[in-house]
Amino acid sequence: MNAPTGRLAGYQAWEGGTDPFEDYAGPYFFKKMEDGSIKCAFEALPHHCNGGGFLHGGSLMTFADYALFALAGDVLDGPGVTVSFNSEFISAVGSGNLIEATGEVVRNTRSMVFVRGQVFCGDDTLLNFSGVIKRIRK
């Protein structure tokens, strides 16, 4: 995948390959901020929207699931799967917007990583989310 440009300049895709579903649903990107936090982003396009012209809830949840793994990247250290995911829809926007997510690891155990975050557009929170990632041993 080519390096993103425009509003997504400075973001990157997963290192060492792609996730076919996320590439199809997104594509989604992340970057490490100066303070060490992670920010994820994608550009909302018409195919991300529902019949009403707003971002589809499934599209927002898919992006939030991507963000779980980006936010947990520094502690995950290997493959994992989402075993729990919760979300609350707060607001709606349409295509043409830059959609971002931030969050934090709230607990990191031997087998699980617990994450929470927010998806937003500018100053408007669109979705609160939390999830649990189970480490997969090779």
Image: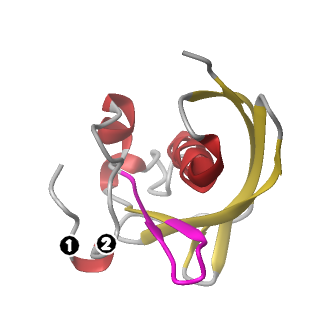
* Amino acid type of the residue that numbered disc 2 sits on in the rendered structure: Leu
Is residue 86 visible to us here? Answer: no
Is residue 43 rendered to the left or right of residue 88? left
Q: What number of labels is visible?
A: 2
Residue 8 tag number = 2
- Queried whether the magenta region covers residue 38, the answer comes back as yes
Q: Residue 136, percent across and down?
A: 62, 21
Is residue 22 rendered to the left or right of residue 100? left
Q: Residue 74, percent across and down?
A: 59, 53
Q: Quadrant of residue 37?
A: bottom right
Q: Quadrant of residue 29?
A: bottom left
Q: Residue 64, percent across and down?
A: 59, 49
**Residue at the image point whose x is 37% and y is 30% from the top:** 21
**Residue at the image point whose x is 57% and y is 45% from the top:** 69
Vertical order, 137 against 31 (above or below): above
Is residue 3 rendered to the left or right of residue 109? left
Which residue does the numbered mark 1 point to in the structure image?
5
Is residue 8 visible to us here? Answer: yes
> What is the crowding at mark 2: few (fewer than 14 residues within 10 Å), some, or many (at least 20)?
some
Say which element carries label 2: helix
Q: Residue 72, percent across and down?
A: 63, 50
119, 19: nearer the viewer? 19
**Residue at the image point whose x is 68% and y is 71% from the top:** 125
Q: Which residues are magenta?
A: 28-39
Q: CA distance from mark 2 to mark 1?
A: 5 Å
**Residue at the image point whose x is 45% and y is 45% from the top:** 51
95, 112: nearer the viewer? 112
- The answer to whether mark 2 and mark 1 are in CB contact below 8 A is yes
Say which element carries label 1: loop
* Amino acid type of the residue that numbered disc 1 sits on in the rendered structure: Thr
> What is the crowding at mark 1: few (fewer than 14 residues within 10 Å), some, or many (at least 20)?
few
Vertical order, 16 against 105 (above or below): above
